[in-house]
Amino acid sequence: MSYDSQLRTSRRILMGPGPSDVHPRVLQAMATPLIGHLDPEFVTIMDEIKEMAQLTFQTRNNLTFVVSAPGSAGMETCLINLLEPGDEAVICINGVFGGRMADIAERAGAKVTKIEAEWGQPIDPQQIKDTLKGLKPKLVAIVHAETSTGVLQPLKEISKIVHDAGALFVVDAVTSYCGTDLKIDEWGIDAVYSGTQKCLSAAPGLSPVSFSEDAVKALDARKTKVQSWFLDLNMVKNYWQGAKRAYHHTAPVSAMFGLREAYRLVLEEGLENRFKRHQQNHLLLKKELEPLGFEFVVKEGYRLPMLNAVKLPEGIDDAAVRWQLLNEFNIEVGGGLGKFAGKIWRIGLMGESSNPNFVNTLVGALKTIIK
Ligand SMILES: *Cc1c(COP(=O)(O)O)cnc(C)c1O
């Protein structure tokens, strides 16, 4: 035990599936002296965060705010508020996170129909169209950036299919948000959740969410109480908006200070520039990795710029090399999840971690290890 000395961590180079590296300005903001969560100054900060969440989600949705818990709680917030026991839900699954959505929807008492694709493949819109023919679902949910496989899912065409079937369109944007284009209003997304520790590059533990007017109507039309007290939007909503802020829970004040600064950094850079930067560093990594024998899992055109899923070259021991990267070079890369465990790596280039220095440092270390 070494808790008799002050906390000290290694200076890691974070290139896994999150958390990503955080700008010193964000760390500094988190060290700002605390104020109360109902202090008028904090209420102003919440309003600022809400506005920056709207700008980055490219939405005018009034019900846009940040859940005081990680991305999985944002997922749960969207699904359990929109679903009542007995409702039909269609969940698209091509990796771990689609599976998690289905599990949550089932726990909420919904009748879940699963649409599945091979891991590493996007979901085919035609498959959704065919499935929706015999159903009347309340919502269809899909993952925009499947972090377990590296697939970027095109959304626009699916959004139209979902709305033609009279359903709400729910999107997991935990990894895509602030790293690749995501237009909530233009693409007709009714409920979206994200996380702070991926391309937004803030500390983990918060989940920005947004709900369309149609989603709010569905919330208002509920006949049963939401099963979770903490995630019940009817109550959280009064904490985040309106003239009188009702106490609901104690906001994670320091984390919100950090998030405010992370948003400021995103807006200073500009969304378009940020998306371009993520794409450029992905291409640099690809150019450097392929000659070493790494192969991309996902076909071109559907690859995530912020999460590079690659098959290991023959003769590379997954756990041993990742151990060496971490312990000798201070570099964290992600291993495979679920059925990809041991077979692939997930190299994150998210937010602050998306830069040429990180790419070159990783490639240099790999060349030393595998030569
Ligand atoms: C990371 C991630 C989540 C879960 O977020 P947590 O903050 O770990 O709870 C959900 N969906 C996707 C696509 C993710 O990458």
Image (tube, helix red, strand yellow):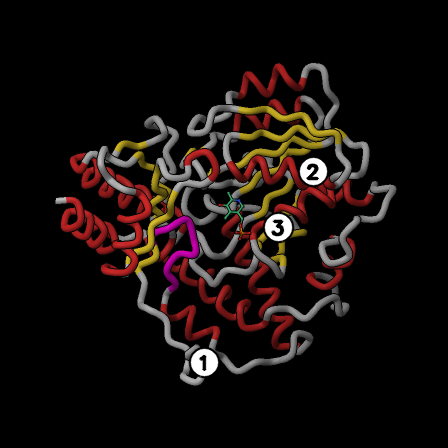
Residue 290: x percent and y percent? Answer: 20, 35
Identify the element where label 3 is drawn: helix
Task: Report the residue at 27% width, 43% height from top.
Answer: 280
Q: What whole-number distance in Å separates the C-alpha atoms at marks 2 and 3? A: 13 Å
Q: Amino acid at mark 1?
A: Tyr
**Which segment is the magenta one?**
15-22
Q: Is residue 141 magenta?
A: no
Task: Report the residue at 70% width, 30% height from top.
Answer: 89
Question: Can residue 244 be seen from the camera position used here?
Answer: no
Residue 3 is marked as: 1
Residue 98: x percent and y percent? Answer: 56, 35
Which badge, 1 or 2, is on the more N-terminal residue? 1
Q: Nearer the viewer, residue 332 or 237?
A: 332
Identify the element where label 1 is drawn: loop
Give the residue pinned by disc 3.
74
- State whether label 3 is within 8 Å of ligand 1: yes
Q: Residues within 10 Å of mark 2 (few under 14, many from 20)?
A: many
Q: What secondary structure characterizes most of the magenta part?
A: loop
Direction from residue 150 to residue 280 in the image, left or right: left
Q: Amino acid at mark 3?
A: Gly
